[in-house]
Image (cartoon, rainbow, N blue to C red):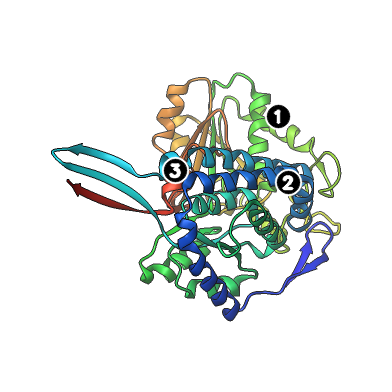
Amino acid sequence: MKIINPATEEQIGEIKEDSRESLTRKLELLRSAQPAWQKVPVLERARVMTRFAELLKENIEQLAGVLTSEMGKPLQQSRNEVNGAITRMKWLTDHAHQYLSDEIMNTGQGMEERIVYESLGVICNISAWNYPYLVGVNVFVPALLAGNAVMYKPSEYTTLTGLQIEKFLKLAGIPENVFQVAAGAKEVGQLLLDLPFDGYFFTGSYKTGKYIYEKVAPKMVPCQCELGGKDPVYITDDISDIKSVAAATADGAFYNNGQSCCSVERIYVHESVYDEYSREFVKEVKSWKIGAPGEDGVYIGPLSRKEQPAFLEKQVTDAVKKGATLLTGGNIISRKGYYFEPTVLTGVNHNMEVMKEETFGPVVGIMKVKNDAEAIQLMQDSEYGLTASVYGADQSRAEKILQQINAGTGYWNCCDRVSAALPWSGRMHSGFGTTLSHAGLRAFTKPKSYYLKS
């Protein structure tokens, strides 16, 4: 498998893909090592994961450089991702003992009622390329903390990063056969679905997640799918600083080149502030530096996948053909690499693909609304349900709106953020299951009830 730098289209590496035989052998190794790892006390497992976080911090420049070279995000954004993963891991390691230890629920009359959180066993983590550290630690860190062994399949677009993760986990003290990497593209993912894992945890597109869910359903094992989004933002009429709101929501839409399941993809703006907001939004977008991801100050680098610029061009063409106004961008950039101009469309509606289908790139539509009721109706008009945001002065008004949106996360005066303390979950085509928080730690366990009569 060839590793291509999306900024230059040059080959930077070559990886031998796993076969059915090598994957079966790795699974056998994981099976043999998992029982001993499960017996290691939770606090000791947490100490190993803390050391892993320390190693990431010590080697951040090397790790960020590898990530940028194969995925294309600007170097500073790669550093930010590694640091974000370290922060996320601290919460998980700090709280692992609290939420994974046995719980005595009742005592009295000679009867003790206890919950024990047992490991699932050997889990399969099929991960994503857009945030390999952040979406990775959502799964393999709590899985390891809970005493599981992990077969980790990084995306073919971030395999080098996946191998770095394996290297530093083992340097931190994870036993050799408790964590294994499955290297390869779609075919390797298919092989993993045929093997007898004790749980499957996938991050990626709705189409692939649906296929995985249907494929593994007969096994009757846990299957969680963190899928895509078409995340809406509503800008109310009482925002006090239009310029700062425009800048914040532009960043929410275009950070990481819009390649995020929780990126802002639909913007609804009250008609009284629509014109000024749109002007400030475009002004912010035009201020960004586009270029090679290793250059200082670059905000927009290349897209990760070769086919994505043509897909974005198709969405823009569809919108303009149906009456949208192109305020900036809209074109594939003529240079080496997979570059697309950051693009802002107004005059959009829900007959356009850009307002209905996941974009996953630096393109966003801004739509004028008359009132809260219209905004709510449009925000609800989606098959996705990951996040939704409201910007405005009135918290109670914002919460009332968010309560009516079928999404796993609601934001007031912020967007595109994830805290390890809160559950991360999608609804409808955005998936199901939970990572992060106490619920995300326990997602990698099988609770067993004990009735102990003296």
Question: Tags 1 and 2 in contact by the CB under 8 Å rule?
Answer: no
Question: Is disc 3 surrounded by few (<14), some (14 to 19) or many (20+) residues within 10 Å?
Answer: many
Residue occupied by mark 3 = 407
- To which residue does mark 2 refer? 78
State the CA–CA distance, disc 3 to disc 2.
28 Å
What's under tag 2, amino acid-wise?
Ser
Can residue 74 be seen here?
yes
Q: Which residue is mark 1?
A: 280
Seen in the picture, residue 381 relative to 223 is either above or below; the reply is above
Q: Which structural element holds mark 3? A: loop
Is residue 40 or residue 301 the one in the foreground?
40
Q: What's the amino acid at mark 3? A: Ala
Compare marks 3 and 2 and give the one earlier in the sequence.
2
Q: Estimate the x, y position of residue 422 in percent, counting from the top left.
A: 48, 38
- Dot 1 alpha-carbon crowd within 10 angstroms: few under 14, some 14 to 19, many 20 or more: some
- Which amino acid lies under the numbered mark 1 shown in the image of this protein? Glu
Q: Residue at x 69, y 62 (%)?
A: 159
Quadrant of the image occupied by residue 269: top right
Using the rendered image of the protein, determine whether residue 324 is visible from the camera's viewpoint. Answer: no
- Provide residue 190's location: percent of width, then percent of height: 54, 73
Kindly report the distance in space between the C-alpha atoms of the residues bearing marks 1 and 2: 27 Å
User: Residue drawn at (46%, 64%), measured in percent from left and top?
Assistant: 210
Q: Horizontal and vertical percent for residue 438?
A: 43, 41
Instruction: Report the Cα–Cα distance between label 3 and label 1.
Output: 28 Å
Lower sequence index among marks 3 and 1? 1
Q: Residue at x 44, y 36 (%)?
A: 376
* Front in this rendered view, residue 298 or 99: 99
Identify whether 264 is placed above or below 412.
Answer: below
Q: Nearer the viewer, residue 243 or 3?
A: 3
